[in-house]
Image (cartoon, rainbow, N blue to C red):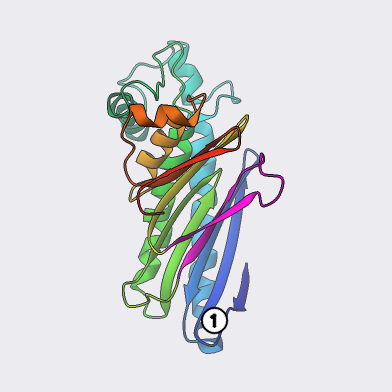
Amino acid sequence: MFVQPINAKYWLAGLSVEKDGVMYEAKIAFKGGEPARQAIAEHGNLAEVQMQYWFDWIFREFSEKRPMSTLNRFNAGELSIHEVSPQFRTVLAAATYGEQMTNQLYAAGEMPNYHPGALVQGWAVEQAFEQHLRPLLALPEVAAVSLEGGGMRRVETKPEDPDWFWTFEVFDKTDDVDPYLEVPIHSGAIATHELIDGVAAVMLPDLTDAAIWVTALSQFEDCDQLSTITVPGRGVLVINKTARTWGEN
């Protein structure tokens, strides 16, 4: 875990956990300088342990690489909907909702080919954020918290700290000159999806919804298809070096 000053007002603490090749990075912006450092470090270390346990569990439940994961056993017919965890059923319901919300652009499929995809990543990061990072905002020293992993990021900043912003980098590999688009976020969620010939990013209050929509956009072959649907929130779609934005970007 690192702790370092950012400016005269804010310090930043960071921690990370890794699972299945994905690095999850949590950051805590706080005030109070050196006197607050030890307390923030203790809370951060506890959050790190809790998040490692959580993402280990997510791997056991949803990994397509793990033969005995709940997802693979469900698809194989070894587990019924009544035998899986409540969290598994929550994701299944979210996938059904996502299909309806996007008019089938997002499609998780049905057993034996049920694959919720990025929805799991967005939901898992959202849940980890709510359970292990949001509670830190109750500490008077903490100004903002952030969790990022697998192209998903959830951040929250206290209203009394309007001068603190998180920055999320959207990488467009088709741009040879300036491939990084910096997106400032005060509070909310952003989901990104790297395309073969571009990138999609969606910003919404809820990360699960953002993950569903960014997956839906990945089905497009050109940016003009954006005119056929209404995507909520803010975002950007880049395909073949053509960019389209919506919302207040």
Q: Amino acid at mark 1?
A: Arg
* Magenta-drawn stretch contains 183: yes
26 in the magenta segment? no
Residue 202 in view:
no
Element type at marker 1?
Answer: helix
Count of all numbered marks drawn on residues in the image: 1
> Which region of the structure is painted magenta?
165-185
Residue 45 visible from this viewpoint: yes
Residue 132 vertical position relative to residue 139 in the rendered view, above or below:
above
The residue singled out by tag 1 in the image is 37
Residue at point 47% right, 77% down? 30
Residue 184: image location, x then y, percent: 47, 61
* Front residue (pair 182, 147): 182
- Give the image quarter of residue 213: top left
Quarter of the image with the N terminus is bottom right
Residue 156: x %, y % from top left = 39, 62
**Residue 178 placement (x, y as % from top left):** 67, 52
- Which residue is outermost to the right? 176
Relative depth, front residue between 162 and 137: 162
Compared with 58, 38 (above or below) is below
Residue 22's spot in the image, x, y percent?
Answer: 61, 43
Q: Is residue 85 left or right of residue 224?
A: left
Of 21 and 57, which appears nearest the observer? 21
The residue shown at (51%, 80%) is: 10
Q: Residues within 10 Å of mark 1 (few under 14, many from 20)?
A: some
Q: Is residue 39 above or below residue 57?
A: below
